[in-house]
Amino acid sequence: MLCYASGSYGSQVRVVFEGNHRDLRDNARIFVGDVEGRTADGLRRYASTAIAQVEQAIRALGYYNPVITSVVTESDDGLAELVLTVEPGEPVRIRSRNVEIEGPGGDDPEFTGQVPRQPAEGDILHHGRYTTLRQAIQNRAGRLGYFDGEFITRRLEVDPSENLADITLHYRTGERYRLGSVTFLEGHDFDPDLLNRFVTFDPDIPFHADEVAKLNRDLSNSGYFSGVDIDASPNRAEDGVIPIDIGLTPRPPRSIGAGVGFSTDVGPRVRGNWREHYTNSMGHRRGADTELSELRQNVSTWYELPLDPPMTDSLRLGAGYQRENIEDVESERLTLGQQWRHQLDTGWMQVVSIRWEGERFRIGEDERGNSSLLLPGLSYSKLQANSPLDPSRGYRLQFDVMGAHRAIISDADILHMNVLARGLYTLADNHRFLTRFNFGGVATNSFSDVPPSLRFFSGGDQSVRGYGYETLSPRDADGVAIGGRYQLVGGVEYQYEFIRNWRIAGFVDRGNAVDDVFDRLATGVGMGIRWVSPVGPLRLDIAKGLDEEFGGGWRIHFSMGPEL
């Protein structure tokens, strides 16, 4: 027989349970609370109150017939303690459960299919779970628009002498309300056509709280408004149809942002951006971005037109300039182009683009060149995660293809492809497993005409750790990294959360940029630590590149950002 004591540190009341009853012990501790400053006689007078509190605590978990004895002890230093010894007895079990949904909601699988299965017949009576069952029926009715619903019968009958209980819940839903037309109130200066594109449901559909919540979320996340007030109260319904009135508070039209960062790939960097969140009543927007680091400097500008639906679909025109000086490669690139973003019904994001790139580059000391390419492209991506900042499971898939042809204002024939896959799964709360795979390839009849920006280089924080940033690459006779036709990179990582938001990690990376997919790959292994900061995960790794001929060795890697 096991005995477990409960009670807060310093309390003069100690409750001891015979048997392994942690849930009863914890509940009794809450009900009794801290008792201090009483004499031995005071505790004797208080004993009946404490016993009643314990009885109430364990009755809530289905134990109606406990045997509780009390004794007051007094130590030599004059301190007294009330000890309650509890034999919980046999629990009350559910003999019958009768849950009926009457009215139109009884034929609605979206309603009946979400009624909790617990407590079920044979379960130990738990008053909290019974309350949850009752509340879940009411909440589901409100969520689906059965606002006139009510319990016809709501009864929990307990027979302590037989240790049996019967649950009877009969709920009548009434008619389901419907969503009416949406009216945007005055005071926002946005074109009604733009606002109506945020409304993704038709008037007179059955009410669903998720539709109203989605409309609220889309308007709030649009970047146009600092406040969104949606009135969809059933009290305003006429003939079961709820009109929807929306008040909007526009945000300030312009903002400026700046930030600093660091990674071992590019060192310290400074970022800045300027945004005009709406330039006219149709919600057009524009902006400019810049990033400055020792290895890379760029500036870009863009103009965006929202499409239908505006929260996912857009047309963006852009221009940019970038200068890089990494290892043996120096390049300057000017870009002009457009992107059409469209989210498919399957959840995949489709991006159709066309851009012109002019690049001037130097590889080593001898190879210099200029390129002019018109690059139409197609991209598909999908991100599934249960949290945007620090997910515990999810995946990212991305496929990109683009090309150029000499017949269309281009200096080379190129077909460029890249595939990326990442996965994350958490087991037993603290054990996280991450995998990633990246494959890229370029097909051309003259590789020397391919500019460095379209060649492949591997190594670094986000690639193969244990090697320098973009140092894994085919090399010429002088040992200069010239970039590869293909890239193959993969990695497996295990993380263990030893303190909330702190994790240790172990990993193996393998990959290279090569001219033949069967060429040898480089391997890196290491350990690291992760901190989930308020702005996202920070990663510090110590890695060992196992292939010295590829430049492998001990390296420290630091980076930040989402893991998917």
Image: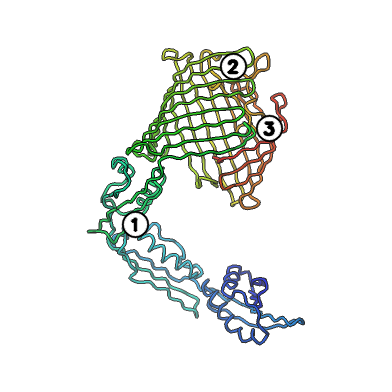
Instruction: Give the distance between the C-alpha atoms of the residues marked 2 and 1, in whole angstroms.
Output: 64 Å
Q: What amino acid is labelled 2 in the image?
A: Arg
- What residue does disc 3 label? 466
* Residue at x-position 41% and y-position 39%: 277
| Residue at 48%, 30% in the rendered image | 399
Residue on which disc 2 sits: 362
Q: Residues within 10 Å of mark 1 (few under 14, many from 20)?
A: many
Q: Does residue 554 appear to the left or right of 489 in the view shown?
A: right
356 w.r.t. 26: above or below:
above
Dividing the picture into quarters, in which one does residue 282 lie?
top left
Work out whether 110 lies above or below 92: above
Here the colouring is rainbow
**Rendered location of residue 30, percent (x, y):** 57, 71
Q: Which residue lies under the disc numbered 1? A: 144
Tell me if mark 3 has few (under 14), some (14-19) or many (20+) residues whose alpha carbon lies within 10 angstroms of its own.
Answer: many
Picture layout, residue 53 above or below residue 23: below
Q: Amino acid at mark 3?
A: Gly
User: Vertically, is 494 above or below 99?
Assistant: above
Instruction: Choose mark 1 or mark 3, whichever is in front.
Output: 3
Instruction: Residue 8: give x, y in percent of width and height.
Output: 64, 71
Q: What is the spatial separation of the Cα atoms under label 2 and label 3, in whole angstroms? A: 26 Å
Nearest the viewer among 284 and 255 is 255
Q: Which element type, helix, strand or loop, lies under badge 1?
A: helix
Front residue of this view, candidates 471 and 266: 266
Which of the two labelled residues, at mark 2 and mark 1, occupies the earlier sequence position?
1
